[in-house]
Amino acid sequence: MSGHDQLAHCLCELTRLLWKLLLPLLLVCVLLIAVLVLLVLVVRLWLQSNRNARRAADGRPTVAFFHPYCNAGGGGERVLWCAIRALQNRYPDVNFVVYTGDQGVTGEQILDGARRRFNIALPRPVHFVFLRHRLLVEPSLFPHFTLLGQSMGSVFLGWEALTEFVPDIYIDSMGYAFTLPLFRYLGGCSVGSYVHYPTISTDMLTVVRERNPRFNNPDLVTNSLFLSAFKLLYYCLFALLYGMAGSCCDLVMVNSSWTLDHILSLWRAPNRTSVVYPPCDVSGFLDIPLEEDGAKKCHPIVSIGQFRPEKDHRLQIRAFKKVLDRRIVDTPLKLVLIGGCRNQEDEDRVLMLRGMCHELDISDQVEFKVNVSFEELKTELEKATIGLHTMWNEHFGIGVVECMAAGKVVLAHKSGGPKLDIVVPFEGGQTGFLADDEDSYAEAIERILALPSSTQLQLRLNARHSVSRFSDQEFEACFLAAVEPLMGTLER
């Protein structure tokens, strides 16, 4: 036998061997897929039988909102309660459920908190499903690969929610996109989403690609070409999964033009996506009198925002310190940080910020107001001169709108929602100022305080008039119009 024939014979034997190994493997794969499909069908039938039994008992369809931190007191929670109030008024024959991970409180206490913090009272009670495993979506549980860890944790938390109560319509109102396929394909629900902030964005990819340091891109990564390349690959794969999860949505609502651009690029569902600006309690601040501030004995600078790292309170404190050091303004200044704490991590962050003020020797000029009531918030805004905001790529900026409605001169970050949607010219007039680093913030504060009282008053009037497009009434009209096709899927 020639060498060529021997080689051909060996290849034939190798092919037979591979086929003998491959055929059983293919059969096993087909069997596993069949078992998986059968399991999914069985689970889906079981969940749908639970929903049918519930529907037979109460005779009404149910819309459920997934909001594990519904008692947190932030802008996302205001959207939740305004949305439920609008739906309850429009659809009196529909029940409403909120999946929450809050423990140690009752449903009545949660609703009372919404009334005190946001001045929102629901027409009728809602049913709360208290989830026991909210820890699975806490960022502290995942010091590394946080995005992936929280997203996988949200799937397990969503499974707990789905097995506790199967709704007819499921709306994720907090950004847990990976729960959407669970409720759609296993629960058989119509699904919708209100996106405050994309879990991952093209801006985040750019930050990693360009190796720019941020609160979620530490120096350890930016200083290493290998770690940056690995993180970029991780982000790209996660973005692909995120887009697949979000694309199964029947309805997508986003809170700003900035969020819209990112969600369209990731979820690719333009025909099902619309902008619904979040509700800001404009009317609650309109009775604050607009007077010239020239006679003020102190100029408070007020910041409104939850004590989360991305809000960048450190930048506010550093810029304020720089203004004090320059001593250009004779009138005493005070920085008032108002915000909510969701958990122990946020409370620890407040302690860290207090320590930072002590190190900079400005503790006497900085006040912290944590989890304040609506009335206290209004009182602080009435005394303020400047409304301060420093979050890079803020998805919208409810706190910015509230400051403008209260007639304050706003100084916001030159990015995201404040730049594209809020601090924009109104009828040809300026509505506020934008900055992007410590020096530009300090310079802008000095420029605002140096404005003639009449000029400052006109700017505040422009700002107040411009925010009517972000009122509760505008939100309810836009939200109801957006969800009408989804609500039309209910069987009554």
Image: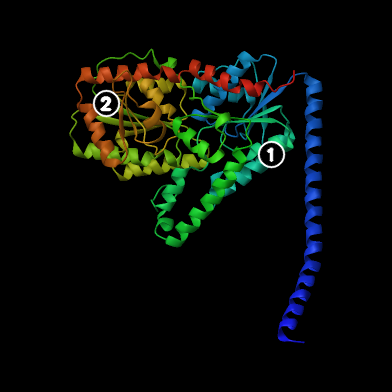
Pick whichever of labels 1 and 2 is earlier in the sequence: 1
Look at the image and tell me in which quarter the C terminus lies. Answer: top right
Residue 71 visible here: no
The picture quadrant where one finds residue 445 is top left
Give x and y (percent) for residue 316.
33, 37
- Find numbered disc 1 in the image and state the secondary structure of the residue it sits on: helix
Give x and y (percent) for residue 39.
80, 44
- Viewer-proximal residue, 453 or 228? 228
**Dot 2 surroundings within 10 Å: few (below 14), some, or many (20 or more)?**
some
- Viewer-proximal residue, 156 or 303? 156
The figure's colour scheme reads rainbow
Residue 481 falls left or right of residue 298:
right
Q: Residue at x 67, y 39 (%)?
A: 181
Question: The disc labelled 1 sits on which kind of residue?
Answer: Leu
Q: Residue at x 72, y 80 (%)?
A: 7
In the rendered structure, find residue 391 and report the number of the disc placed on it: none
**Dot 1 surroundings within 10 Å: few (below 14), some, or many (20 or more)?**
some
Residue 169 falls left or right of residue 458:
right
Look at the image and tell me in which quarter the N terminus lies. Answer: bottom right
- Find numbered disc 2 in the image and state the secondary structure of the residue it sits on: strand
Asked if residue 425 is positioned above or below residue 219 in the image, the reply reads above
In the rendered structure, find residue 299 and report the number of the disc placed on it: 2
Q: Residue at x 77, y 74 (%)?
A: 12
Disc tally is 2
Asked if residue 339 is positioned above or below residue 491 in the image, the reply reads below
Indicate which label's residue lies in the foreground, 1 or 2: 1
Identify the residue under disc 1: 182
